[in-house]
Each structure stands twice: as C-alpha cells, then as structure tokens.
Image (cartoon, rainbow, N blue to C red):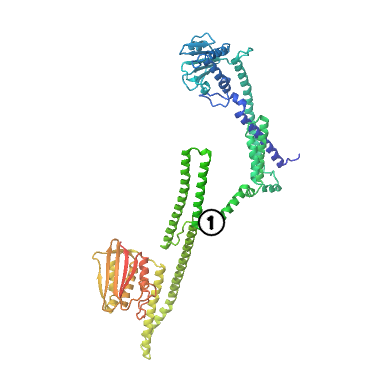
Amino acid sequence: MKKIDNKFLKYIFLIIASLALAVFFTGVQELKLGNAYQTVKPGNLIRNDKSIISDNFYESAKFENEFLQNIVITLTGSTSDKWSNENDKNDAKEVLKDVNQIKFFIENRKNNEIYTNTKSKSSDEFKSKESGYCNIDINFSNGEGLYIRNINNAIKQAKFDTNRFNGLWDDDNLSINMIYPKEPSEYSKDKYFYEGDLLNFYNDFKYNINIVNDLITTSIVSGAIGLLALILYSINKSKLFKKQYLKLSKIPIEIYIGFIYIAGYYSSMYFSYIPSITIKFAFILLVLMFISYVNTFNEKKNILKNSLIAKLYSYTKKLGINIKKNIKKIPLISRLIIIGISSIVVISFVMLILYTNWYWQNSKLTLVICILVPSCLISFIVLYFIKQIIYINEIIEGADKIKNGEVNHKIEIKGNNNFTVLAENINNISQGLDNAIEAKVKSERMKSELITNVSHDLKTPLTAIINYIGLIKKEENIQPDYLKDYVNILDKKSKRLKLLIDDLFEASKASSGNISFNIEKLDINQLLKQSIGENEEKLTKSNLDIKLKLPEEKVYINCDGKRMYRVFENLLSNISKYSLENTRVYIETKVVDDNVYIYMKNIASYELNFEADEISERFKRGDLSRNTEGSGLGLAIAKDLVELQQGEFNIEIEADLFKVELIFKKS
C-alpha cells in the first residue's frame, strides 16, 4: 500500500480544520443572533439558573415579550382608570370575552370593578378554585414591572419591560391573575385572537427548541473536530509553500492582511446558515495559509522589510535624521522667530475660522475659544523658553563642577540646538582635560618609579664607596699627607650623596603615596618637644633662640609618630640651615574648635624672592646660590607626609619672614 504524503495530509487537515471551525463559529453566531435562539432564550427571570435556553415555553422570552405583555395591556385596558375612553375599554372586553383557554381575573380596587371569564368573585377565590399549569399574579403597585410566575408549583419572580405599558404600571389599584394550560388547544374560530396567537407561539417554540438543540450539538462536535484537525495540522512539519513562493514577500504584507481583514469583516456579519459557513471557511483558510506562509521564512524580518509600515518608518527615520542634522545650523534666535511667526499665523487662522464659520455663532463660546487658543499657544512658547533657560542653568552648573575639579562630570545632552552644541563642546573639553590629567598622573608616576629605581640602584655602589673610604681612613701611614685631605673630602661628599639619595627615595615614595602609616593617637606637643630636643645641636650651632609656646593641656591628633617626627625634623633642619644667625624662631601650637594648628616662623638669611607654593616643590631651594647643604627635598617630603595623614601643609612668606602652618583634626 502506497504511503500517504505528509504534505497531502497537511492539506487535508487544513481543509477539515477550516470547514469544521467555520461550522462551529456559524453555529455559535446562529445561537447568539438567529431567530431560533431568540425564540427559546429565557425570559427576564430575577432568580434563574443562568441557563442559555429555556425548556419551558412559559419561561421563554418569546412568551414573556411577545404574548404576555400584549395580553396584559389588553387586560389592563378593560378595567384601568388610566383608559379614559370608554370605547377602548369596551373594545378590550370584546377581545377578551371569547378567551377560554386562558383564565383571568382583573380587579380594580379603587372602583371595585371586576372583570373575569370565570365565576370567581374575588382574587383569593380565583386562586383557590381555578387550576392550571402556569399561574401568573401581577400587582401594579410595585412600579418596577415585577410579577410572580408559578409553573407546576415552581414559583419564580420575573420582570416586564414597563416602558411598553405607557404609565399603566403606576396604577396602584389594579391587580391581574391569569392561568394558562400546559399545552394550548387548537381553535378554528378566527375571533379567538389571543388563543390563536398562544398556540402559534407555542408551536413555534417547540419547533425552534429542536433547532437550537441541534445547533448546540453541531457546534460542539464541529468545534472538537476543528480543534483536533488544527492540532494535527500544526504538528505536521511539512511545508505548504515551496521556496520559490518566497518571492511573494516583495508584495507588502499589508495587502495580505487587507484581504484577510475583508474576509474577517464579512465573516462577522450575520447571514443565513450556508453563506455564513462559506464566508467563514474562506476566512479561516486564508488565516491558516497566511500563518503557514509566514512560517516558511527562516528569518521573519524579511517579511517586514517590504511592508508599507517599514518603508514609512524608514522614510520617517531618514527625514528625522536630516532634520536633526540641519537644525543645528539654524541659530536659536532664528528658531524662536520662526516659532513666533508660526504661532501668529495659527492664531490668525483659528480666529478667521471662528468668525467666518456659521457653526460658531454662539458669541460666548467664540469668546472662550478666542481666549483659550492664544493662551495655549502663548503657554507653549513660554514653556519652551523656560525649558531652554533651565537647560542653560544645567550647562552653567555642569561647567562650574568641571571648573571645581569634577573633570569626569558630563552635562546631559538634550534637544538639538545651539545649547546642545555648547553642552557637547564642554563635555569634550572635560574629556580632554581628563585625558590631560590622566597623562600627567601617568607621567608623575613614571617619574617617581624612575627616581625610586635609580635611587635603589645607586645605594649599593654608594654604600661600597663609603665603606672603602672608611677603610682607607683607618690606614695610619697614608703618604703623601695631602691624600688624607682628599679622603676626608670624599668621605664628606659621599655621605652627603647618601643623604641626598635617601631624601630622593623618601620623596618619591611620599609623592606617589607608596608608603605605609601606623596611625595612632599621639600627644603632638610631646612629639614636638622631642623633635626640638633631638635637633637642638643644629639649632644652637646657628645661634638661634627657640621660642616655644604650647598649651598646658595635652593635645592629641591621629598620626604616625615616625612620619610626623620626620616632618618636624625636616622643618627644624630647614630652619637651622636657612635662618639668619642670632634671631628668634617661634614655634607654637593652637587648638581652635576641632582643629590643631602648628606654626613655625623664622627669619631667612637670604632674600625670599620666590612664591610660597614654589618652595614646597621637589628640588626647589630658597638659596639659589646653593651655598648650603640642602637637597631641596625636605619641604616636599614634609608636605607629602602631612597630606597623606589627612592634614594640611601651608607656607606663607612676608618679606624675610618664613612661616609654615600645619593643620590636623583634633582627636
């Protein structure tokens, strides 16, 4: 037996699914909108079981809306005071007098008028003596259209459409009782108007209840078949369309969707059964084939490339890019003028329309609009100016932050105008400045590394030179004698070179921050006294008079004792070398609020012809003749060590007065 092709099966499942689903949706539509369902749907029961169809004729909307309300209107007309015309009352009674299958009792409690086709004298007697399948009790006093329906001893409350009673429902004096048979009988007389209608409605209900049940069964079965066929169609991996059909992708996808939309639109309309199935079948088939066609593409984006929306988007995007590129070329003042002129034109046009169109003859409305439209346009212009001013302030604030050292700060780019260009230029300057600072930091780091490496490399041979000079000095018989002077000079200069290299090494570590600290709470006055004591020989040799002024109480700061001693040593050494002999040196400690201030003041022995910030640079010496033994690194080392301990190092120069100020947080 020849194996069935999967592609052929896919087509079969496609046809079955489309046809079955078309039958299903047609059945659902017929159940919702068709005449059969309108006949058998439930009436306006207040307490119902939410069923979609009524199994009993007397519970259907057909009975309630088309028969019951009509006969009730006639019954009320026979006795109600609202019918002022006696002829109308007589006509109503004439219609009702031959009604035999429907037993009724009407009572007007205002004038005690009773009308009935039974022998009962009161409503209670009517209810007790007369019997039937469906009993209906209507009391017009509730004003809401409510009535009681008793079908085979099952009591339910239902509701009329009171709008059809022309105010009769407000008659508090009127009550109606009716009894209906289970199945109406056939009458041959034409004058049995209501009884003939009752029989016709009943037969119509019985006929349509069968149709509705058949529709429900057909819809369920067709829906199940359609769903199963759709699943089998979906899991079948065969392709309905070959690759050569992909050239159809050049046709905009909106055309396919347009055809599907038209088919869908007509399939949603109500037609008779067969045409409705045909249209829905075509619609579902088109949808499934379109989905299959789309799935043929490996890359779904290829379908959208030639769509009208994609082309419109591409054109709009290019137009926007061109406008964005060229708008910067228009000066801001020109743009503001264009906005102003455009606003005037719009306002003038609106005013012209308002005063020439007959629709706006209402003067108050015209006045309101004449005020509202210009106000909106002016508000728009004002808001535009405010927005630009706010942006200018943001640019100014950003420039201030960059000026104050936040070189990484970026101003937010907004809009596409001259201010945008300004913000971009400032950001570019900030980036350039950041790069320059980074390059300088890198250069300084390389310098420090070079100095550190060179200093380290010089230490080993220099140590050897100093050791050998020491050994030569220990020799007793050095001839000729002047060689001893040479050895002493070598010893002195080599030791000075060692001191210079040590300072250089220390300065490099301090400036790069590559140095460890043991921060602890120290009495700065005690450390200062110790430093002065250990450097007293140098100070005394220069005939300097130290004037020390310290608080009586202990003053504590957080620092590294070893590093702070080096700071004081460098400063005191600097004083001993460069102070004028026989002068006084003032050293003072003060506590102001949470800060500790340390001052050292001395009179220089030479002219201070340099700036205060220059002297703390490396290799910078105040003695330009370099007659003293300084290395030019002492103040630089002291400054770096202070700042690395979260302190401040300041120098002030006034004539020949040299003043150093150290500031620390009090501990």
- What residue occupies the far front of the structure in this picture? 356
Query: Would you say 92 lies left or right of 142 here?
Result: right
Q: Which of 238 and 628 is in front in this view?
A: 628
Residue 627 on image: x %, y %: 35, 81
175 lies above or below 358: above
Question: Which residue is drawn at the image coordinates 56% and 26% (left, top)?
Answer: 51
Q: Quadrant of the C terminus?
A: bottom left
Q: Which of 244 and 112 is in front in this view?
A: 112
Residue 538 on image: x %, y %: 29, 77
Residue 147: in sight, yes or no? yes
Residue 548 on image: x %, y %: 25, 71
- The residue that disc 1 covers is 327
- What residue occupies the far top of the structure in this picture? 119
Question: Which residue is drawn at the image coordinates 52% and 49% (left, top)?
Answer: 345
The number of callouts visible is 1
116 lies above or below 244: above
Q: In which quarter of the image is the N terminus?
A: top right
**Rendered image quadrant of residue 390:** bottom left
Question: Which residue is drawn at the image coordinates 41% and 79% (left, top)?
Answer: 462
Residue 123 on image: x %, y %: 49, 12
Query: Would you say 494 lies left or right of 361 here?
Result: left
Query: Would you say 501 lies left or right of 342 here?
Result: left
452 lies above or below 38: below
Q: What element carries label 1?
A: helix
Could you tell me the amino acid type at mark 1?
A: Ile
Circle 1 Cα neighbour tier, 10 Å, few/some/many (<14 / 14–19 / ≥20) = some
- What residue occupies the far right of the structure in this picture? 1
Q: Nearer the viewer, residue 269 or 18?
A: 269
- What residue occupies the far bottom of the structure in this picture? 480
